[in-house]
Amino acid sequence: DRMRVVIREYNRTEEERIDVAQRWSDETNWPRLCAPRYDPNVTYICYGDSFKTCREPFPNPDFVSYGDYMLRKRSFRVETTCPLYNAQQLWKLPRKMSRISAVNTFLCTSTDVKKRREVPEDDSEQLGNFLACRGLRTVLLPQSACMEAPLADASLYLHLVLLPQILYHLEQRLVVDAFVRHSARISPRLGGYLKRVNEHSMLEALTAKSCAVDWDYDRLEWLGDAVLKVLHTDALVNAPALKEWTSCLHEGDLSVVRSAMGCNARLQELGRGCGIDTFILTRPLSRGEWTPTALVLKSDNDGSDLAKDVNAKYRPSSRVIADVVEAILGLIYLNFGFDAAQDVAVSLAITLPLPRTDQLVDYDFVCSQSPPSPRTARRVASFLGIDTVLHPSLLVEATTHASCLHHQTPSYQRLEWIGDSVLSLAVRKHCFNKYPDLNVGPLVVIESTIVSNETLAYLACRERMQDIVRHADSTLPSRIESFYCDLRRNDWGLWTTDPPKVLADVVEAMLGAVHCGFGFDVGQRSALHVVSPILDAIFAHSNTSELSSSSVTNTMMNPRQVLYEMVPSVKIRTLSEHEYALRFATSKSVWKCGRFADTSPNGDDVVCYISCCNATLLALSDHSTNAARNRCAGLLASVLGKPRNDDLVAALACIASNCRKSDDEELI
């Protein structure tokens, strides 16, 4: 019966729709869709009589009354006794559903929250204290100026408009449920864990970016990548099938093997073999791109299946399948811990099973060097935040530089390789939980800042860990002293320093020793303890909304990366001071010590010069190559980053583009 009424109403003429609106009463089936006669292309949801008339004062003092407003603004005359009806403009419906977060109000300033809750004074007066649908503009419409829409049943109309979204999200949850049941068949361990995971988290792990919704697997994949790195590290070090031949491999060889074990090609092959690719959500909710799975689109001409082209367009790529596998590992680790992630990885043949032992490696080798003193062992334990001192053999190995060639004790390179993966996972999980609404981009910037050589070297020097490094490098003390001097500078902080790599390597080697000697959980806690000063500094001075902005993340990024993002076509080169003075004899002025000065053919500094299209933009002199590059890039990025220089950045990009086109034409 309702559909018969809708069809009958839809076939009404314009005069009939105007006549019906003039006979509105309390017995009308509210709400109704209507349009103003003076602007029939705008649709309103009308909720009924407001018990006001057009003689009521208009909120804007420029108009005497609602009748005066309609006449002067809309050129439509109404009687002063004409009733006003509560209405909201149906101007636009959302194109996607937003995920409701419990921390949304926390991420906003108090001013933003207050603005959200406030109702403009004019709207509240014009509205008559009426609010039905939040987010739609409210008005009072004169009855004589209204006519019903062809489809006037507002409830049915809104249900029809939202039906695709309802079906879209319902299908997504049905896919999640089907994936959990499929996982239980292919891997009882995986299925058992997924049954206890929150449905939305599962949906997040299976959703690709192409769906254009507010959630996707990006964050979980970022975390799962670090989990996979630790899993493969443990497998290469301790798996019985690999231990015999990997024990003699160099750090670089181990990195190559680890990368091959976790490469996208292997992960996507495993994903396809397990059938995971058939459950990945890739199609967005857009016209012509999505239909419910049970419906098949047929062409009017030849009866062909129109959905085949769409399905082929959104078939998950190898990269997407590999990312979803990593996202699932990240999800399992986040909810059930590392042992559960290892069980799932073994069941899916992602990694190899390990013997059940708390000791990861055999460190009972004979040290040719004297063991560290008890005081040194306690200092290291305090630095690492552990209650028990490290095994002497592990501590000696973690502090032995590769320059000690005449000793039987292996250098720290192997433990440093292990500690790199341990530190990466600890930092990623901490940032993941600390900022649940932060995208991967800012998270990567935070991570790279925390685990950089400059940061780890600073933390080592902060506790004077360089005093316990065993080495035979005569230049190391002077380079450490130079690093101390660089730390006193204020421009761009740690990025203007050039620390010896051995300092950062020793920190990672110690973390690797903790992981090997005391197990995964102790290693993770130790890693967070070591970098806690940097974590506290970042989290104390930046909230989520600030870290989401490029201005704040740029202060933590390497200056060269900031500059490349602003002007990708720039080239950063370095020369010794005497070479620069001889090559650029006509323009040898560089920025040095806060002012421009000429370079000397007898100088011993390093000059970094940045050019674009063979034109030098800036040249800067410093005592080390790394410091010169970062300071020069940072200074130029600061200049180009000022608001008044946006046109200059655009001009540099345009010039570079034109130069590339000219080069291409010459080649053709």
Image (cartoon, rainbow, N blue to C red):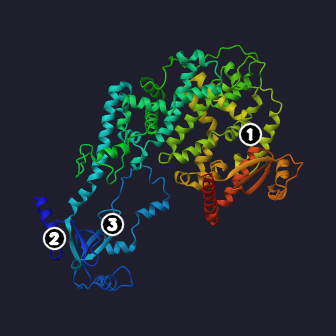
Residue at the far right: name it: 602
Pointers 2 and 1 in contact (C-beta within 8 Å)? no
The disc labelled 3 sits on which kind of residue? Answer: Trp
Residue 3, image x and y in percent?
Answer: 13, 59
Depth check: 9 or 416 in front? 9
Which mark's residue is nearer the viewer, 2 or 1?
1
Indicate left or right for 150 with 194 as reference: left
Disc 1: which residue: 499
Q: How many marks?
A: 3
The disc labelled 1 sits on which kind of residue? Answer: Pro
Which mark's residue is nearer the viewer, 3 or 2?
3
Residue 482, image x and y in percent?
Answer: 80, 41
Residue 76, image x and y in percent?
Answer: 27, 84
Residue in the picture at 47% in, 52% down: 106
395 up-or-down from 194: above or below: above
The disc, 2 or 1, on the residue closer to the chain's N-terminal end is 2
Task: Rate crowding at label 2 as few (under 14), some (14 to 19) or many (20 or more) other CA atoms within 10 Å.
Answer: few
Depth check: 490 or 211 in front? 211
Pointers 3 and 1 in contact (C-beta within 8 Å)? no
Task: Give the secondary structure at mark 3.
Answer: loop
Disc 2: which residue: 26
Disc 3: which residue: 91
Residue in the picture at 71% in, 23% down: 411
Depth check: 572 or 216 in front? 572
Residue 110, image x and y in percent?
Answer: 49, 59
